[in-house]
Image: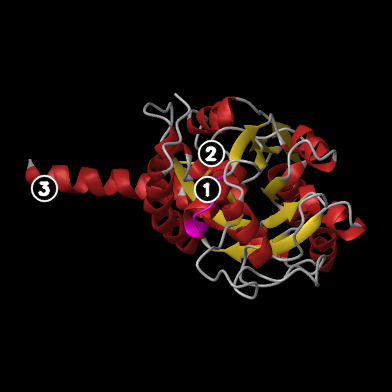
């Protein structure tokens, strides 16, 4: 009996291996959907659209962008987590949701383990920007002014639990400053009130702020990544501006539902890498203020495992909740 059991198990494994190989060879034979947890515009949607057209050419099938915003990204995440793991329904994942929501919500309808990484796509630094009415010219002056006027400055965010919210709370912790949080439903309404001077401070990604810093409608005090942003070459990094302890980058990655066959993941990963390497994609990303930064599945997984405890600590320290 044991002999037949072993032979039977081997046959099952071989059958599954052949099935996975056959699936990978035929994949894709119909359109692929990229599910975006945000509305059109902004870093996440921009990243999806940077990828969709070149990926369609590289992989040989139509790639559709499907925006499913709402519930702090949870609608889209649950949708993909429950999708058939065949490579045709993929998630454009945002760091603020992927590593933030597990700490923000006591109960989630999904878990980071519900997804298999395909590739890191883009990274965006954040910009510390203030309205011209704030009497400062650099980051050191701003920190000193905020300390001298506790509770008198308001800062905008894209909503409770967003990267702009959590990131600004991290900034406050790093600098010992006190500012009042004013949450908005997305970048659009937030930036309008910042431009009008109703809210004085906004820490957000270049797609939201770059053109206003370039035009002088807002003061760009620092970018929060390792390098200066090519669209704002005169804006120093936080390290250059005297605050090396504070860095804040937002990332966007591509995920498949857990259980997607490894050969399909490999084909998707290779196709994404080729797509992001196309010269026209680099040109479009530079114009949008987004940095292309490909990482393979293992490196993407390592990034998430590193950031999950870091974000959890920051969120708990600031007592940020959404439930």
Position of residue 80 relative to residue 98, above or below, is: above
In the displayed image of the protein, which residue is found farthest to the bottom? Answer: 240
The quadrant the N terminus occupies is: top left
The region drawn magenta spans 174-178
Q: Which mark is residue 22?
A: 1
Q: Residue at x 49, y 55 (%)?
A: 176
Farthest residue in the front direction? 148
Taking depth in this image into account, of 259 and 104 the one nearest to the observer is 104
- Which residue sits furthest right? 215
Q: Which residue is mark 3?
A: 3
- Label 2 to label 3: alpha-carbon separation: 34 Å
User: Which numbered mark, 3 or 1, is in the foreground of this view?
Assistant: 1
Q: Quadrant of residue 189?
A: top right
Horizontally, residue 252 falls left or right of residue 108, namely right
Residue 13 locus on image (x, y percent): 31, 48
Q: Is residue 284 visible?
A: yes
Image location of residue 322, percent across then percent down: 48, 28
Residue at which label 2 appears: 86
């Amino acid at each position: 009996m044991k002999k037949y059991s072993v032979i039977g198990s081997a046959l099952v494994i071989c059958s599954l291996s052949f099935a996975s190989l056959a699936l990978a060879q035929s994949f894709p034979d119909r359109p692929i959907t990229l599910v975006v947890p945000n509305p059109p515009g902004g870093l996440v949607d921009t990243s999806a659209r940077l990828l969709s057209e070149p990926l369609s050419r590289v992989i040989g099938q139509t790639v559709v962008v499907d925006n499913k915003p709402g519930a702090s990204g949870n609608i889209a995440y649950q949708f993909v987590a429950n999708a058939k793991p065949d490579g045709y329904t993929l998630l454009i994942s945002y760091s603020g949701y992927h590593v933030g929501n597990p700490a923000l919500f006591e109960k989630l309808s999904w878990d980071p383990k519900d997804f298999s990484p395909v590739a890191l796509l883009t990274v965006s630094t954040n910009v510390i920007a203030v309205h011209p009415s704030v009497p400062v010219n650099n980051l050191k002056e701003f920190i000193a002014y905020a300390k001298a006027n506790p509770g008198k400055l308001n800062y905008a965010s894209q909503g409770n639990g967003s990267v702009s919210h959590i990131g600004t709370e991290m900034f406050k912790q790093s600098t010992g400053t006190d500012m009042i949080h004013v949450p908005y439903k997305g970048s659009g309404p937030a930036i309008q009130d910042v431009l009008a001077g109703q809210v004085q401070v906004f820490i957000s990604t270049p797609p939201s702020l770059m053109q206003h810093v370039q035009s002088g409608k807002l003061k760009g005090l620092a970018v929060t990544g390792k390098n200066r942003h090519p669209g704002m070459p005169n804006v120093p990094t936080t390290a250059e501006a005297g605050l090396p302890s504070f860095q804040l980058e937002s990332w966007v990655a591509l995920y498949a539902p857990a259980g997607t066959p490894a050969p399909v993941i490999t084909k998707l990963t290779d196709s994404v890498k080729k797509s992001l390497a196309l010269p026209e994609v680099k040109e479009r990303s530079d114009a949008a203020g987004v940095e292309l930064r490909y990482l393979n599945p293992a490196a993407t997984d390592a990034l998430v495992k590193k950031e999950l405890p870091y974000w959890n600590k920051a969120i708990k320290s600031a007592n940020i909740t959404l439930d």
